[in-house]
Image: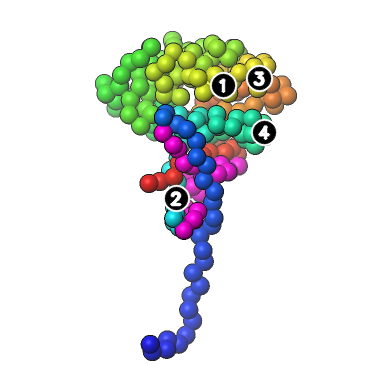
Amino acid sequence: MENQYGITKATPSLPAIDLLRVPHKGKTLLVGYPAFGPHTHRNNLETMSKEYSHSKELPKISFKPATTSESISVVTYDFEKIKKEIFDPRWLQAGYIVRTQDGVFANTSETKESVLKSMLDKCEKVNGIYLGENDFGFAPYKTFETGVQDCDTFSQGGLARVLEHTKEKTAENLRTIASPKFYKRGVNVWGFDKVKEPILRVAYLGSDGDFDYDRLDVGGFDWNVYYDGYAFGVLRE
């Protein structure tokens, strides 16, 4: 072979990342571990979309944002550990929601009201909420309570069930997370007020540090643009 003279550019290896396997709706979900963050939601999404390396079998991988249902499955797997790592010091950026004058949409960034209503036509109405493909769903305000409440009231409400995307009458994973074992003071659902025009937000879950981490906060009040939190990325196929 003829010699080639001059500079040979270095080819840096991709950053290594671990994978966490958790059960999710009867299947196995693979996510990058630890979670991306702590950073703003926007920056976490940018970071997870980059290329990484895991093994010889998976030399080049990237991640997509977890849906609210997927995020909940991940943190439920070993919540005692996740609570200390994410919920107590910061919070989990669970996924996109859209607040409207009638209720809360989950796992969509669409904010045009006519389009959102047309999307409901493709959904199944189950126990008062609407469930569609790719974890899309809608919970009317009348199906859930806001403010401080106990574990069962929260997990049986429409918001919890649409975030977990379950047809059951109780969001069992969120019931596990919100149980008195972890949060003796119950749950505080806030930031889900009615709005005149649809508004895109990020649902977050975290411990209420004002009460020694004894209350679960479930919020939908802002983009988390200016506040650092954690987000999970699902392995792209």
Q: Give the range drawn in magenta.
A: 27-56
Q: Give the farthest residue toward the right.
A: 212
User: At numbered mark 4, what does the secondary structure look like: helix, strand or loop?
Assistant: helix
Q: Distance between the residues labelled 3 and 2?
A: 35 Å
The answer to the question of whether label 3 and label 1 lie on touching residues, with beta carbons closer than 8 A, is no
User: At numbered mark 2, what does the secondary structure look like: helix, strand or loop?
Assistant: loop
**Residue 69 percent location from the top left of the image:** 45, 29
- At a point 59% along the width and 32% down the height, the residue shown is 78
**Residue 153 percent location from the top left of the image:** 54, 11
Left of 157 or right of it: where is 228?
right
- At a point 65% along the width and 19% down the height, the residue shown is 181
Q: Distance between the residues labelled 3 and 1?
A: 9 Å
The residue wearing badge 2 is 62
**Residue 163 percent location from the top left of the image:** 46, 24
The residue wearing badge 1 is 176
Q: Mark 1: which amino acid?
A: Thr
